[in-house]
Image (cartoon, rainbow, N blue to C red):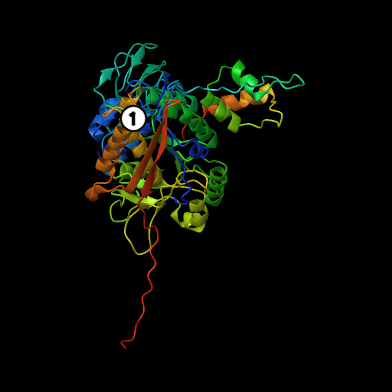
């Protein structure tokens, strides 16, 4: 939910149904380094898990990450227990 | 999923932020019993224990009913983390005891030698609740043979002669669920939604998680929207464990300030309920209140929602030093008022940006109720004759207006002041578009009265 929805108004009927536009993601940076999105795909993470991992680690401005950092964040996030 | 109907949550930037059916919610938390990722309808404490046995979910549900909460749904995630067995403490010098197995719950085991002697002559009994209740008395087995106790635990004795009265004690931890298990459970809750039999309006995650988890939950909201399920989440901030309390509260502030999502609330307050020796999240009180109030009602309304069992607010002294900052950061707190008895919810914040119309849960709930009503009335009109006498746009408007009016504008239980529905049909695009504008009711959050003398003229 975003405030942009205000601009969409109240769309009642769309005979074609909603189209989902999945933005294309780059799995590698221009220098060939692996990106966060690339690792999300490689590890087959759901969007929800990826969001948690993303919040648990630093991703460089160009979207690249160290795989070791990614794995550590993934383990830390998915293994967290309720406190 | 083919979804011809969209009922958006429109934010008009106002700058402000069946009665019990509106409060139906799901609690997701760790429990020992019941099937994982399965929704159970729960109407009482007795039913809670029968379904789930023990665990954080059971504790939360129990307090929910004690706080006057209404019937609800509950689910436990998969317990992917196995329980464990702690070290054994032995009171004497008899044969060693070795526990093994996969514990199914958190228990305090005691094994007591009743009659001394050699193996197969000596007798013992055991307790899984620290000695409150005991088993029957059994004969010790041959040396090295295993004995199945209970709760997934097996023991065996070493060599030697048993002495009467000797005790062995050890504890087990319960299996637990991790963040990933909770995310799977949220997916399962979404799949279980049914307008007729499982129509929940919000989801309470039992147990505190860090902000990374909040982000994860936030990302699931799009899936709920796609499924036309209009919900909000109530999460818990992790409980204080140890260390400096001010530092704990400052970290809380920092975490809250980094997160925004208007369909998520995070409860930071903790209360000692009833005879509990531990503090539990104020989310229990919040959800119990929401389960029994109309959508527009503040769950901290002093005249209606005093905690029925709350005894003490954790760190209340320290919280008072931070209370304006915490409140400003959208931390949901329990509160006590000067010279007034009781514990209350201070404010039912949502984590939305300050520009949103939806600053509190009681801002969001009426709007979502309108969306639910509108959706249920719009769907039968999909692919209908736009100009038919009983199927056209005017009929659709009338249906929506009637539904909202009956459900939310009855003078005896008014949830909104009024509404206006505007819909138009575009023949070239074959699309109906428009809006439902809601006029919200207000809430008296602060009351200031000057009292003074006036002279008669």
The picture quadrant where one finds residue B117 is top left
Q: Nearer the viewer, residue B171 or B81?
A: B81
Q: Does residue A29 appear to the left or right of B125 in the view shown?
A: right
Location of mark 1 (residue): B378
Give coordinates of residue B239: x percent, y percent.
47, 41
Give coordinates of residue B247: x percent, y percent.
56, 49
Give coordinates of residue B434: x percent, y percent.
41, 37
Q: Which element carries disc 1, helix, strand or loop?
A: helix
Q: Does residue A60 appear to the left or right of B33 in the view shown?
A: right
- Which quarter shows the N terminus of chain B? top left
Residue at (51% x, 52% y) in the render: B328
- Which quarter shows the C terminus of chain B? bottom left
The chain ID associated with circle 1 is B
Give coordinates of residue B36: x percent, y percent.
37, 21
Residue at (41% x, 18% y) in the render: B102
Note whether residue B48 is visible: yes
Above-or-below relation of B59 to B354: above
Dot 1: few (<14), some (14–19), or many (≥20) neighbours within 10 Å?
Answer: many
Residue at (29% x, 48% y) in the render: B309
The picture quadrant where one finds residue A13 is top left
Above-or-below relation of B232 to B388: below
Note whether residue B177 is visible: no
The picture quadrant where one finds residue B380 is top left
């Amino acid at each position: 939910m975003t405030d942009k929805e205000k601009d969409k108004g109240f769309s009642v009927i769309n005979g074609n149904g909603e189209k989902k536009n999945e933005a294309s993601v780059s799995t590698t940076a221009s220098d060939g380094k692996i990106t966060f999105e690339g690792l999300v795909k490689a590890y087959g993470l759901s969007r929800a898990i990826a969001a948690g991992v993303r919040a648990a680690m630093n991703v460089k401005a160009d979207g690249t990450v160290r795989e070791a950092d990614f794995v550590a964040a993934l383990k830390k996030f998915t293994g967290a227990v309720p406190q | 999923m083919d979804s011809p109907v969209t009922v958006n949550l429109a934010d008009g930037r106002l700058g402000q932020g069946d009665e019990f059916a509106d409060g139906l919610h799901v609690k997701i938390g760790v429990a020992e019993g019941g099937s994982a990722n399965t929704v159970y309808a729960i109407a009482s404490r007795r039913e809670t224990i029968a379904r789930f046995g023990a665990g954080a979910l059971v504790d939360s549900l129990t307090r929910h009913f004690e706080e006057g909460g209404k019937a609800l749904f509950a689910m436990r995630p998969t317990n992917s983390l196995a329980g464990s067995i702690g070290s054994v403490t032995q009171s004497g010098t008899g044969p060693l005891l070795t526990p093994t197995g996969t514990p199914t719950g958190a228990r305090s085991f005691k094994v007591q030698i009743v009659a001394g002697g050699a193996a197969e002559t000596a007798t013992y009994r055991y307790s899984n609740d620290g000695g409150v209740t005991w088993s029957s008395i059994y004969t010790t087995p041959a040396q090295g043979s295993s004995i199945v106790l209970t709760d997934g635990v097996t023991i065996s004795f070493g060599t030697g002669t048993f002495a009467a009265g000797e005790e062995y004690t050890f504890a087990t931890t319960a299996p637990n669920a991790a963040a990933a298990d909770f995310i799977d459970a949220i997916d399962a809750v979404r799949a279980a939604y049914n307008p007729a039999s499982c129509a929940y309006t919000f989801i309470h995650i039992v147990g505190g998680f860090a902000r990374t988890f909040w982000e994860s939950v936030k990302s699931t909201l799009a899936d709920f929207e796609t499924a036309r399920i209009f919900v909000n989440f109530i999460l818990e901030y992790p409980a204080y464990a140890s260390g400096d309390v001010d530092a704990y509260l400052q970290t809380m502030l920092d975490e809250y300030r980094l997160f925004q999502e208007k369909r998520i609330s995070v409860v930071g307050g903790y209360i000692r309920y009833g005879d509990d020796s531990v503090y539990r999240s104020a989310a229990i009180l919040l959800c119990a209140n929401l389960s029994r109030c109309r959508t527009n009602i503040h769950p901290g309304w002093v005249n209606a929602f005093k905690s029925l069992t709350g005894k003490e607010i954790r760190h209340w002294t320290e919280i008072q030093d931070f209370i304006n900052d915490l409140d400003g950061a959208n931390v949901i707190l329990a509160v006590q008022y000067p010279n007034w008895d009781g514990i209350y919810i201070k404010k039912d914040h949502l984590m939305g940006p300050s520009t949103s119309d939806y600053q509190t849960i009681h801002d969001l709930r009426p709007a979502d109720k309108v969306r639910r009503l509108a959706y249920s009335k719009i769907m039968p009109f999909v692919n209908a004759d736009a100009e038919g006498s009983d199927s056209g746009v005017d009929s659709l408007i009338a249906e929506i207006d009637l539904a909202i009016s009956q459900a939310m504008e009855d003078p005896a239980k008014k949830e909104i002041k009024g509404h206006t529905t505007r819909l138009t049909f575009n023949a070239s695009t074959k699309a109906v578009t428009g809006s439902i504008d809601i006029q919200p009711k207000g809430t008296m959050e602060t009351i200031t009265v000057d009292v003074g003398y006036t002279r008669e003229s």
